[in-house]
Every structure is written in structure tokens, then in C-alpha cells.
Amino acid sequence: MTGTPQNILSIQSWVSFGHVGNAAAVFPLQRLGFEVWAIHTVQFSNHTGYGAWTGAVFPPEAVADLIDGIEARGVLPECGAVLSGYMGSEGTVAAVVDAVRRVRAANPEALYACDPVMGDVGRGVFVRPELPDLIAAQAIPEADIVTPNQFELELLTGRTVDTLEHALEAARALRERMRAGGPRVVLLTSLVRSGAPGESIETLVVTDDGAWLCRTPLLPLDPPRNGTGDAIAALFLGHYLKNATLGAGRSAQALSLSMSALFGLLSRTHAAGTREIQLVAAQDEFVKPARLFEAQQVG
């Protein structure tokens, strides 16, 4: 990127120790050359996977108040995208949607990328029980990019995703509920399906122009590292924005670069043997992955 950096408003959780939510998304976006306006929905000492933490969930009014303050600076016309992750409460979903609408009113070209953080395979739903329906009803219809994992795609669509064809059908069904007139990009992460090569993990992107699959080796990370979904949502959005001139190949390029960067990050994490993803140590991977995995068109 050259000239003045593009600005992204990122509304997610925050941890002081480790990397999830904004603590996993902000730095990769900055490393890609973006200015990030971060608003935290919670501030915890560490992610909840440890079983114990301190901190607080911020009320929706606090999120809205920060949006008011940013808007008062007169900078919303310079915001190129909104990224949301863990929202935490019913009112926060409404506050995020209101922020998206205010940004779009100031800059109609701004994109909204929604990471619908709700649950995962093995853990089930780990947010408040009312949140999945609220995200589906309020956030998804405003979204230009949605980045569910396999569990979340099934939850949002009511469909079983166990084959590539089922994944494509579910992603297309979700696209129908996204913002009309937007690019309606669905990025399905952590896809595990019948017929896939062993010891691999796949990510699928489905757009108006087609569908692409990117496959990377499955690293033996046990337990799975928290924050990878937050990082991939940020990396995909960043590379999608940076490759705006590619037309139909934009999503495929963003998929390839973001998944290659994530593999580099997880490889560094595996080598270090750490519970937390090695975001700082792997920072060069975000810009130029050491190993590139191409996206293959599948539909």
C-alpha cells in the first residue's frame, strides 16, 4: 500500500495476555499497512480457554459512546471497512450494526466483514444463547464478508456440512441473506469433510464469481490454538482490500495469501510449543508468506 493508509474499524474482544479478538486481529492488519481503530467489547486478562480469567464485559453503551467519539472527529468518511468479532451481548450486536450503518452513511464504499463468533466443533455454542439468532437476524443482513467456521455455518443455515457440495450449498444459502448489492463473500474456515486428503485442513471462499478451496497441512496442535479464527478473518479482510484491482480473482488471491500466512503463523507456534499463537514472531508471514498455498477453483 502506498500513500495514506486505509482505515479499518475493528470491534472485538481484547485480552491483555495472549492473542484473541482484537489482540489477534489488530497487529496483522497494521503489519499489512492499515490503520486500525479498535473498540473492545470485553477486556479480559486472558482468553477463556484457560478456564479462569479476570476482567469485564463492556456494556453496549460503552461501544456506542466510542463510536460517537470517533464520529465527532469527522473521520468516518475515511473508514474503508468495519470488522466485527465477539460481541458478548444483545445490545452489542445492535451497537455494531449501528456503527456499520453510520460508517456506510459517511462512506458508501465501506465494507463490513462479520466474523460470527458463536461456537466451534467440540465446544458447541459458547456465547449467550440469544446471540446466534441476533447475529443471524441483525448482523448477517448488513455484511459484505462473513467468515464462519464449519460449526457456525451449520448453525447459521441449519444445514449439515460434511461434504464439499454441502459446504457450497450452505455457503450459497448464507450469501442469499447477506447485504444486497455487496460482494457477499463467505469464507468458510476449518472445513473438515469426507473426500478431503488426510492430515489437511481446508478453507473455502464462495463469491458471485465462483468458489475456491485452499488446503494446508494439518499441524498437530493440541489443544487447538485460540485466536486463529480472529487472525484469519483479519488477514482475509486485509488481503481482500489490498487486492481490489484483481476483479474476479480478488477473493482467490486473498484466500491464498491469508491461509498461507496463517499456516506460517501456526508453524511458528507449533515449533515454539506455546499455548498462544506467535503473532509477533511470525509477523513477516502476514506480508510475504514463506510457503504459498494456491487456491483451487471448485465452483
Image: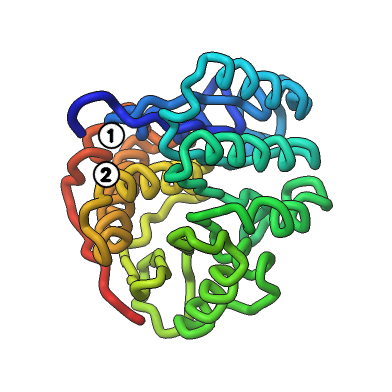
Q: How many marks?
A: 2
145 on left or right of 173: left
Above or below residue 131? Residue 174 is below
Q: Residue at x 28, y 63 (%)?
A: 252
Which one is in front, 263 or 238? 238
Q: Which mark is residue 246?
A: none
138 on left or right of 213: right
196 on left or right of 230: left
Pointers 1 and 2 in contact (CB under 8 A)?
Answer: yes
Foreground: disc 1 or disc 2: 2
Q: Which mark is residue 242?
A: 2
Which one is in front, 218 or 63? 63
Above or below residue 274? Residue 163 is below
Above or below residue 23? Residue 228 is below
Query: Tag 1, which secondary structure?
Result: loop
Q: Quadrant of residue 55?
A: top right
Quadrant assignment for the C terminus: bottom left
Q: Quadrant of residue 208?
A: bottom left
Q: Residue at x 45, y 81 (%)?
A: 164
The answer to which of marks 1 and 2 sits earlier in the sequence is 1
Q: Residue at x 18, y 52 (%)?
A: 291
Quadrant assignment for the N terminus: top left
Above or below residue 266? Residue 157 is below
Q: Which residue is mark 1?
A: 32
Amino acid at pointer 2:
Lys
Q: Can see residue 267?
A: no
